Image: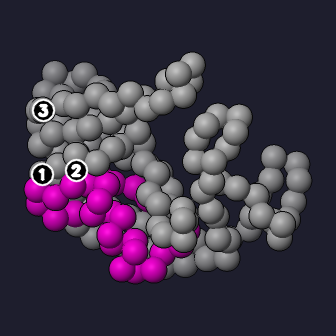
Amino acid sequence: MWYQKGEKGRTLIGRVPFKRDLLESVQEFAAKQKIKCARVEIIGAVEKAVISYYNQDKRVYEDREFNEHLEIVSCLGNLSLRDSKPAVHLHITLGDSEGQLKGGHLQKGTIVFAGEFVIEEILGPELHRGHDPDTDLPLWQKNKSTPGRL
């Protein structure tokens, strides 16, 4: 286990535009704000959603599309760098009109009805995503200057 220490930076709050792609909107906002590392939280509702499940045996994401109105019960994740650009990694839980929940990894194609976000910037570390051979996922990579072992 390794870690990096960070300091609290800006706290940015706002709305995601109506009928825009949720993932792309957050990604574009992060790039414009030059955010390199952050914690992300979103609530609201979507008109349709695309979420995925990572099949650990096949080592692929399996997408599920929902063409219905859903509440964003919770959407949490982080932002770091991948190929020197902001990369948003979000997990989302959605609720339907019957109170049934659907959850997974947020993908492009999720269209916002209403969305409010909080992005808490973390200054100091520059976490970069790279290929992890154990999982086949783009996970945070330790660099030579990363302190600490547990």
Q: Which residue is mark 3?
A: 67
Question: In percent of the image, x 35 and y 43: which residue is there?
Answer: 106
SS of the residue under disc 2: strand
Question: In percent of the image, x 48 and y 30: which residue is there?
Answer: 60
CB contact under 8 Å: marks 1 and 2:
yes
Q: Which mark is residue 95?
A: none
Q: Which mark is residue 44?
A: 2
Mark 1 and mark 2: Cα distance apart in space: 8 Å
Camera-side residue: 132 or 79? 132
Q: Earlier in the sequence, mark 2 or mark 3?
A: 2
Mark 2 and mark 3: Cα distance apart in space: 16 Å
SS of the residue under disc 3: loop
Residue 121: in sight, yes or no? no
Q: Which residue is mark 1?
A: 113
As shown in the figure, which amino acid type bears the numbered disc 1?
Phe
In terms of image quadrants, where is residue 140? bottom right
Question: In percent of the image, x 50 and y 56: which residue is there?
Answer: 78
Numbered disc in front, either 1 or 2: 1
Identify the magenta region.
Answer: 16-45
